Every structure is written in structure tokens, then in C-alpha cells.
Image (cartoon, helix red, strand yellow):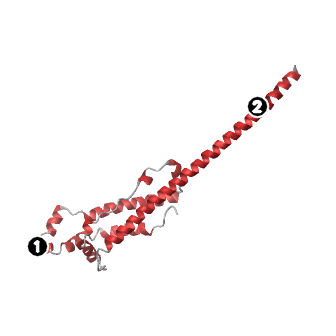
Amino acid sequence: MSDNLTAAIIAFLVAAIPGIFIALLADRLDANREEKERRQKATNGRMLLALEIKGNYDALNRFWHDINVLDKENKPELEQHLAGMAQNGFLAYALPEWSYVRWEAPSPHWLAGLNEKEIAQLDQLYRDLKQIRTLYTRLVTISPQEQEMMSHGSSARFWYNTYANMRSGIFPLLNETVQRVLTQRDPLA
């Protein structure tokens, strides 16, 4: 009986070993496919985020250039520069819409592919874009009281000078934030 048992065990092992190898090979191939898919998702996510950043950067750069050339004489003093911009249509100039989609709702698959420095730089970039929106809104929004003050008396003729005087504290903060974004190197480069 022991010869029969040994023969049965050997026959079982001979039949099972190829199945075990096939199962191990299939598992390894599945793991490789899943890893390749994970890497592709991370790469695609980085690319989409890089495209969003480039679009935001290009829109900001174009916007900042366009509003600053409204002061045709490019006056060096802040209030004169702001008054020149206001006189030539600055208050009606619309701020571009930034895209925050890829940063505010990131996929965990590609977010895990960013290092700590990249995440910190991206966070600062998107905070700066929101700060630009806030400062710009404050800069171009005129309260009814301010409107009243600018439309009466001698200031009515030179309302843009009054406007520039009232907003001269906001523009440097806006300029500083814009310059920080425009001079920052691409966090994903």
C-alpha cells in the first residue's frame, strides 16, 4: 500500500505542479498589468494637471500684459499707472476664468505620484490664483459711496485719479501675487 500511496502522491504532484505554475504566472501577469495601468493613470494625471497649469499661466500672463498696456504712457508711479489703466478701460476688463478642476478633485491614482515639494508648490500656485481673483475683484468693484464721490465736483472730470488713489493699496498686493505666479517655475517640470 505504501507503494500505491507514494505513486498517488507523485501522480498528484505531477498533475498539480503545472497548475500551480500557471496560477503563479497568471497572478504575476495580472500584477504587472495592474502596475502598468497605475503608472499610466499617474502619467495621464500629471499631464492633465500640467496642461491645466499651462492654460492658467498663459491666461494670467496674457491678462496681466493686456491690462498693463492700457496705461499707454506706462507711467512709473503706481497711482498714475493705475489711473492711466482706469482711463482706458481697466474697470471693464474681465479676469480670465482659472481652471481648478484637476487640483480640487484629484484622482488618488495620480496624486500619489506627486512628491511633497510638488504638492506644496501646486497648493501655493492655486492659492495664489484664488488670491488674484479676490484682489482683482476688490480692485475693480466700486461701492455706491465711491461712485457717488467720483461723480461729483471736480473729481468727476478726473474720476480715474480718484479711483487710483482709492485703490493704490490693493494694486501692489495684486502685482506681487501675479509676479510670484508668473516667475514660479512649473511645479511639475
Instruction: Left or right? Give the position of 45 relative to 176.
Output: right
The residue under the point 46% across, 50% down is 106
Q: Which mark is residue 77?
A: none
Which corner quadrant of the image does residue 72 belong to? bottom left
Q: Residue 154, percent across and down?
A: 12, 75
Q: Nearer the viewer, mark 2 or mark 1?
A: 2
Above or below, 168 against 56 in this view is below
Q: Residues within 10 Å of mark 2 (few under 14, many from 20)?
A: few
Q: Quadrant of the N terminus?
A: top right
**Amino acid on which disc 1 is placed:** Gly
Instruction: Left or right? Give the position of 176 relative to 50.
Output: left
Above or below, 60 against 22 in this view is below
Q: Residues within 10 Å of mark 1 (few under 14, many from 20)?
A: few
**Amino acid on which disc 2 is placed:** Ala
Furthest residue in direction left, as rendered: 153
For the question of whether residue 144 can be seen, the reply is yes
- Disc 2 or 1, which lies upstream in sequence? 2
Circle 2: element type: helix
Circle 1: element type: helix
From the image, tell me which residue sits under label 1. 153
Q: Residue 62, percent across and down?
A: 37, 68
Marks 2/1: CA–CA distance:
100 Å
Most foreground residue, 83 or 174: 83
Instruction: Left or right? Give the position of 7 relative to 115.
Output: right
From the image, tell me which residue sits under label 2. 16
For the question of whether residue 112 can be seen, the reply is no
Most foreground residue, 132 or 21: 21
Label total for image? 2
The residue under the point 70% across, 36% down is 23
Q: Residue 178, percent across and down?
A: 38, 67
